[in-house]
Image (cartoon, rainbow, N blue to C red):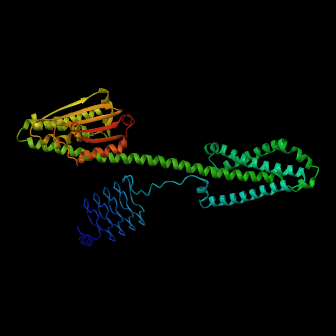
């Protein structure tokens, strides 16, 4: 379809088009009104959607890798299960757009990495955050200037008694400030869990600071200041210039309540971050399961289709064999449809599927096919592996190996452990793999499944030497971990 034909289609259908499952790679949709369009299941990789209107459009299950959506209107568009690597969404309106279970590197606006929880992020919040910043700024500047002032007085005063007094004042304030923070920090967890009302928390911390202030300053008086203060008591004028003690206490109470607020905000943000991470892990798990289900759904019809073709070819020529194949196929159906949502099965179950499948094909090929299934260590059959992992490999051996031989063909399945890996080897005596062969859909599905589940701890190899075989290896440590349920 050309761009002109598409524009004509839009006009005829009242701006609603149906292009489900179309091949539109590199197509130019720029500036078009595709409101409500059905573009699902289509290949639109590297398509140009610059400035296009895709409001409420359905693009689910499509390949959009490398597509350009610059300045496009994607309001409530459906991108679920799409491939979206290297998509350009600069200036696009993605309000209400759905990106559930899209490819890992896709654009997912609902998953925004949270900012680190720091005093900076708290102070950037409007309202209370701004007020706290102003108060902290004033107190810090005033406190720094006071320290400078008294330190300078110690340096320039000629009266040793006054120098001792100023030194005591500096020490007292530094110890006071540090202690108020430590007290608040120590109590914030208890207050958060046991006192639900915010004003009660502040009241409790205020009372605690009063008690702590009186006890601490009494201790400091007897330890550091008693001698100088008793001497200064003989000069009432000097002590009269000092503010009443309760004003200093009010300062401590104010600072403690500010610290309490900041610490509470930080804990709330931490809790929200933890909850979001938990939700993201669940979404990732659901996404992985959805991708596995999609692969599973594609593999099942693949081998059933071939088996039904085999039955059709025997219905008139050999009804007894057709009946036998039908019974064997029903056994495969029971395994396929009786999964109850399970993604994993034991190796023993998988080998039973392989034997059943090979029996189906043995009826078809007669004496032209023999097979064997050998497990080196019987305990390996208890391992959990993804369902339908082996059958596509065996089917590939039939299709590209045995079916191309005029004489007897043989398939050998060997299971063994080597170098802490489970090795699954499928050998056939058909023609060698061509050098450029990367495998059909079945093998690609196996590769995708292994990559999704085990990452770099699993691999699949096509070998022609020393014998022709497909070798699948999975790390034993990965197999022994709990699979996705």
Q: Position of residue 92 (x, y in %)?
A: 41, 65
Count of picture labels:
0
Vertical placement of 174 versus 473: above or below? below
Quadrant of the rendering where the C terminus is positioned = top left
Tell me what residue is drawn at x 59 percent, y 53 percent: 118
Q: Residue furthest left?
A: 317
Q: Position of residue 103 (x, y in %)?
A: 36, 53
Q: Residue furthest front?
A: 466
Relative to 191, 161 lies left or right: right
Relative to 93, 245 lies left or right: right
Quadrant of the rendering where the N terminus is positioned = bottom left
Relative to 443, 281 lies left or right: right
Relative to 414, 149 lies left or right: right
Q: Position of residue 279 (x, y in %)?
A: 46, 48
Q: Position of residue 101 (x, y in %)?
A: 37, 52
Q: Residue furthest right?
A: 234
Vertical placement of 264 versus 325: above or below? below
Vertical placement of 341 versus 140: above or below? above
In the foreground, 236 or 413: 413
Q: Say whether residue 358 is visible.
A: yes
Q: Say whether residue 342 is visible.
A: no
In the foreground, 148 or 390: 148
């Amino acid at each position: 379809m050309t761009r002109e034909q598409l524009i004509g289609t839009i006009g005829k259908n009242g701006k609603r088009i149906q292009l489900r499952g179309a091949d539109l790679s590199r197509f130019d949709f720029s500036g078009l009104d595709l409101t409500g369009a059905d573009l699902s299941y289509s290949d639109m990789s590297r398509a140009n959607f610059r400035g296009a209107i895709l409001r409420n459009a359905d693009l689910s299950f499509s390949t959009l890798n490398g597509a350009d959506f610059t300045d496009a209107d994607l309001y409530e568009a459906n991108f679920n299960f799409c491939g979206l690597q290297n998509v350009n969404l600069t200036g696009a309106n993605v309000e209400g757009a759905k990106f559930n279970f899209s490819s890992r590197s896709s654009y997912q606006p609902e998953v925004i990495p949270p900012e680190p929880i720091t005093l900076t992020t708290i102070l950037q919040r409007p309202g209370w955050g701004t007020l706290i910043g102003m108060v902290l700024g004033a107190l810090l500047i005033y406190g720094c200037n006071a320290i400078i002032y008294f330190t300078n007085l110690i340096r320039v005063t000629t009266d040793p008694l006054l120098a001792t007094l100023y030194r005591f004042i500096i020490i007292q304030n530094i110890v006071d400030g540090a202690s108020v923070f430590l007290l608040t920090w120590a109590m914030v967890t208890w207050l958060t869990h046991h006192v639900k009302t915010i004003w009660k928390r502040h009241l409790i911390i205020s009372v605690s600071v009063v008690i702590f202030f009186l006890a601490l300053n009494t201790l400091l008086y007897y330890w550091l200041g008693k001698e100088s203060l008793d001497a200064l008591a003989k000069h009432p004028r000097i002590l009269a210039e000092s503010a009443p003690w309760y004003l200093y206490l009010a300062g401590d109470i104010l600072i403690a309540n500010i610290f309490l607020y900041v610490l509470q905000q930080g804990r709330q943000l931490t809790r929200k971050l933890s909850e979001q991470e938990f939700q993201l892990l669940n979404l990732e798990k659901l996404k992985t399961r959805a991708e596995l289900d999609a692969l599973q759904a594609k593999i099942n019809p693949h081998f059933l289709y071939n088996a039904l073709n085999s039955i059709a070819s025997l219905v008139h020529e050999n009804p007894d064999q057709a009946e036998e194949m039908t019974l064997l196929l029903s056994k495969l159906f029971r395994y396929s449809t009786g999964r109850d949502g399970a993604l994993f099965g034991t190796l023993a179950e998988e080998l039973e599927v392989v034997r059943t499948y090979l029996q189906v094909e043995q009826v078809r090929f007669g004496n032209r096919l023999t097979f064997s299934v050998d497990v080196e260590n019987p305990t390996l059959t208890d391992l959990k592996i993804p369902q339908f992992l082996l059958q596509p490999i065996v089917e590939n051996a039939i299709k590209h190996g045995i079916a191309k031989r005029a004489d007897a063909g043989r398939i050998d399945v060997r299971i063994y452990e080597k170098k802490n890996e489970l090795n699954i080897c499928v050998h056939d005596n058909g023609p060698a793999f061509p050098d450029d062969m990367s495998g059909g859909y079945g093998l690609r599905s196996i590769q995708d499944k292994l990559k999704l589940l085990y990452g770099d701890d699993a691999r699949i190899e096509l070998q022609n030497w020393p014998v022709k075989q497909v070798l699948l290896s999975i790390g034993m440590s990965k197999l022994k971990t709990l699979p996705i349920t």
